[in-house]
Amino acid sequence: MYENLPIFRKAMQLNVTIEEAVRGFSRYHKYSIGMELRQKARAVIYAIYKVYFATDKEQALGALRDCAEELKIIIYLAQELKALRDFKQFELVSQMARELARQSQGWLRSQSSHPSRQG
């Protein structure tokens, strides 16, 4: 099932890392940018699930890629707002998000080059 996909496991790790980061945010950032980060990170997981069961995989993969890119933007915004504890924390979550976006783009590319392929 989708739980065994490497991209799903990475998305779960990223969610845990983001939850831990948001826990340390100031009250103001926790309920603004922190909430947005948590929601978008979960949306990536849901998008992976949707790709796994989609009949139109290319469209679902495009949505996953877009969701991963949006998460990267929110992470960069959190850094600019100084919500993240330090640069090391930013570096960790942004690297994880970049890897996730790279995997989703690769999955989309592989699906586009094999239109009859499912999975």
Image (cartoon, rainbow, N blue to C red):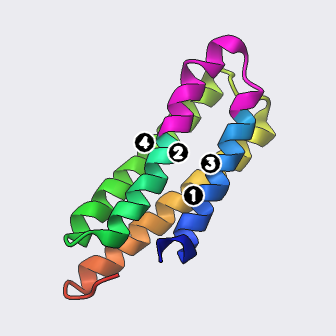
- Relative to residue 105, is residue 69 depicted above or below? above
Marks 2, 4: nearer the viewer: 2
Contact (CB < 8 A) between labels 1 and 3? yes
Q: Amino acid at mark 2?
A: Ala
Contact (CB < 8 A) between labels 2 and 4? no
Residue farthest to the top? 28
- Of 109 and 51, the residue lying toward us: 51
Q: Which residue is located at x 20 percent, y 83 percent?
A: 115
Residue 11 numbered mark, or none: 1
Magenta highlight range: 22-39
- Quarter of the image for residue 47 reads bottom left
Does the magenta run of residues contain 27?
yes
Secondary structure at badge 2 equals helix
Marks 4, 3: nearer the viewer: 3
Residue under label 3, please give it: 15
Secondary structure at badge 1 equals helix
Query: Closer to the N terminus: mark 3 or mark 2?
Result: 3
Contact (CB < 8 A) between labels 3 and 2? yes
Query: Closer to the N terminus: mark 1 or mark 2?
Result: 1
Secondary structure at badge 3 equals helix
Judge the density around disc 4: few (<14), some (14-19), many (≥20) Cα neighbours within 10 Å. some
Query: Closer to the N terminus: mark 2 or mark 4?
Result: 2
Q: Residue 109: give x, y in percent of width and height.
A: 33, 75
Residue 41 numbered mark, or none: 2
Judge the density around disc 1: few (<14), some (14-19), many (≥20) Cα neighbours within 10 Å. many
Residue under label 4, please give it: 70
**C-alpha span from label 1 to label 3:** 6 Å
Secondary structure at badge 4 equals helix
Query: Closer to the N terminus: mark 4 or mark 3?
Result: 3
Q: Amino acid at mark 1?
A: Ala
Contact (CB < 8 A) between labels 1 and 2? yes
Q: Residue 29: give x, y in percent of width and height.
A: 63, 18
